[in-house]
Image (spheres, helix red, strand yellow):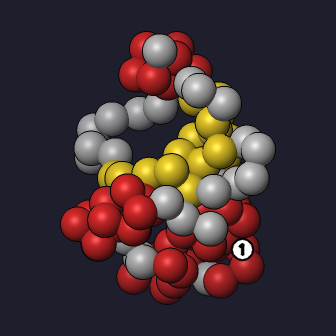
């Protein structure tokens, strides 16, 4: 399930349903405010996908690997989606500063 806001943001940022499903399956989870969690592709999750889908898949979809989503903990509804800047790394402290 996706909110209207998430649908608009996904279209604006070029994030399709397949990327959202990959994030929900392989994405690393970090807490976000207001009873939500953030899912993004970490080095570990990219290695897991590479083992399952192959190096060509990762190379072909490298732009989509910068995507993240925020979802509700209660019903797992996607609240919003976005892309991380190329030089931005997510550490626990940075996630807390961004969303608190």
Query: Which residue lies under the disc numbered 1?
Result: 51
Q: Is residue 5 above or below residue 73?
A: below
Q: Is residue 89 above or below residue 65?
A: above
Q: Is residue 22 something that shows in the picture?
A: no
Secondary structure beneath dot 1 equals helix
Q: Residue placed farthest to the left in the image?
A: 12
Give the side of residue 57 with respect to residue 52, left or right: left
Residue beneath the point at 60% across and 62% down? 23
- Residue 26: x and y in percent read 69, 61
Residue beneath the point at 23% across and 66% down? 12
- Residue 95: x and y in percent read 49, 24
**Which quarter of the figure has residue 98?**
top left
Q: Residue placed farthest to the front in the image?
A: 4
- Residue 17: x and y in percent read 50, 79
- Residue 47: x and y in percent read 65, 61
Q: How many marks?
A: 1
Along the line of sight, the residue nearer the viewer: 85 or 47: 85
Give the side of residue 22 with respect to residue 65, left or right: right
Residue beneath the point at 60% across and 48% down? 71
Q: Is residue 2 something that shows in the picture?
A: yes
Q: If the image is split into quadrants, where does the N terminus sit?
A: bottom right
């Amino acid at each position: 399930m996706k909110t209207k806001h998430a649908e608009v943001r996904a279209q604006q940022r070029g994030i399709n349903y397949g990327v959202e499903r990959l994030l929900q399956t392989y994405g690393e989870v970090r807490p976000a405010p207001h009873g939500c969690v953030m899912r993004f592709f970490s080095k570990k999750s990219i290695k897991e996908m590479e083992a399952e889908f192959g190096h060509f898949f990762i190379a072909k979809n490298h732009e989509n690997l910068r995507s993240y989503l925020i979802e509700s903990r209660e019903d797992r509804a996607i609240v919003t989606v976005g892309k991380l800047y190329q030089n931005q790394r997510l550490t626990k402290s940075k996630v807390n500063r961004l969303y608190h």
